[in-house]
Image (tube, rainbow, N blue to C red):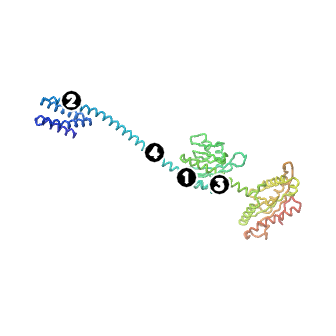
Amino acid sequence: MGRRVAIFFVLVLFLALHLSHRAGPIYLFLAIPFLFLSAFLFFTLNDRVCAIGVVAFSVAAIAYEWVRSNDASYFVSIGLYAFALWVVQRYRDVWNRKIEGIELQKREMEKETKTLEERHLTRLESLKHLEKRVNGLVHLFEIARHFNECLDFSRLISILNVEIVREVSFTRGTVILLKSEPNAEKGIERCFSFGSQQRMDEDLSAQFAQECLNVIGSSSQVIKIEPAHSQDRLRFSSYGTQFPLWLFPLFVEHHLIAVLAVEGGDMNDFQKLEILASQLALQVKKIRLYETVKETSILDGLTNVFVRRHFLERFYEELRRAVRFRFPLSVLMVDVDHFKSYNDEFGHLVGDRALREVAQIIRANIRRVDVIGRYGGEEFLIVAPEIEKKQGFELAERVRSAVARKRLQLYDEEIQLTVSIGLSSFPEDMPGGSLPIEGVDFSQDFVSLLIEKADQALYRAKEEGRNRVVGCS
């Protein structure tokens, strides 16, 4: 509005000067550039009213001077002025198209800039999320390093309960160990439950583990059972299962050794659980290997009973417990009768098989709490906790008669063995006999003394004709 008022004021001034005849031609030629620039400005700004007004005034002023001076040059001036305005109009159109093109480019660049900013923000969020996940995975690997300190499954489950529960979101987990015997039918050896809602019922855990094993079969892929899977949900409903249920098969060298079952897990932690499963597979193999080495080091390779060193350690522990809690204890020394003659007649292979068979018969006729070891070539020692001398005689007689009744088919030979058994008891066969247990000053010598007494009784059994049980006198 201001520019219209200013131009109108200038035009009125020029008009007044011309009408008063005070403005000569020179003033008109000085005013023409101003009028031209004004028209150019108004055309550029799309102010048609002012542009047409300025053009009309300019043409009228030139025409007026032409008429007043009767000079034909003013006609040429009008033509030039009109041509200049046409050029301006053409230039204005070109300029407007360029401006529109520039504006369009500007809008496209703003749009691209906005898109890039959105992508940048999205990638920043993604990077933050990835960084968080990577930190979590690194932390999980650090936790998994604690597994290297585990040499038994109880310690492994303890770490799972303390460390993994804090790092991974789930309600309950179960480690299902499969039988490791070669050529054995696939079955469950034992299972461990962990997590904030771990199963305390061992029978229920065993049933749940068996159902998991049935579902996973021989698959090497992770099995996901979601709440929407009504059929699978029904299979696990009686075990109080939390869904989703993920079953991770743990393979080592293409052999399924265990299964990790995770209930109520968060999908964001699925990758962490995959890493955990791979680490668990290696750890289960390591613990199994350690147990095998440990068992091999304490078991006699031929008879599969405790070697002498480990047997004496267990004997010491049982006798120490008997002294502390005032329990009785019996010691049986078993010797295979005429074993040297069997070796000489049938050979060492038959002799070894005979010893193995005798060891199996002894194990089958004693209690699970009793401790058996190979004490010498054909001698076995049995420690029977919480058994008095009378019950010790009954146990010894059961072992002796079981061996005597068994006919052994060894390779091409059928033989029948007998054993002689010497018996000693605590505290009856200790010095003093009736000495109160609480008054006994426990010593390692007590182990040697009871073995010596049983050996003396065994010697008497052989002198009396073998295939009998004799107690310490």
Task: Give the mark toward the camera: 2 or 3.
Answer: 2
Work out whether residue 368 or residue 72 is closer to the camera in this orientation and state it. 72
Mark 3 residue type: Phe
User: Could you tell me how far apart the alpha carbons at marks 2 and 4 are, in whole angstroms?
Assistant: 63 Å
Residue denoted by label 1: 138
* Image disc number at residue 194: none
Question: Marks 2/3: CA distance?
Answer: 107 Å
* Residue 53 image position (x, y, % from top left): 20, 33
Asked if marks 1 and 3 touch (Cβ < 8 Å), the reply is no
Tell me which numbered mark, 2 or 4, is placed earlier along the sequence.
2
Viewer-side label of 2, 1: 2
Distance in Å between CA atoms under marks 2 and 1: 85 Å
Camera-side residue of 38 and 229: 38
Q: CA distance from mark 1 to mark 3?
A: 24 Å
Q: Amino acid at mark 4?
A: Thr
Residue at position x 81%, y 66% in the image: 453
Residue topped by disc 2: 79
Mark 1 to mark 4: distance in Å? 24 Å
Query: In this figure, which residue is indicated by the disc labeled 3?
Result: 153
Q: Earlier in the sequence, mark 1 or mark 3?
A: 1
What amino acid type is highlighted by mark number 1? Val
Across and down, in percent, residue 378 comes to 82, 58
Crowdedness of circle 1 by 10 Å Cα count: few (<14), some, many (20+)? few
Residue 385 figure quarter: bottom right
Residue at disc 3, secondary structure:
helix
Q: Is residue 396 left or right of residue 155?
A: right
Q: Please tell me how crowded label 3 is: few (under 14), some (14-19), or many (20+) other residues with Cα within 10 Å.
A: some
The C terminus - image quarter: bottom right
Which residue is disc 4 drawn over?
Answer: 122
Circle nearer the N terminus (2, 1): 2
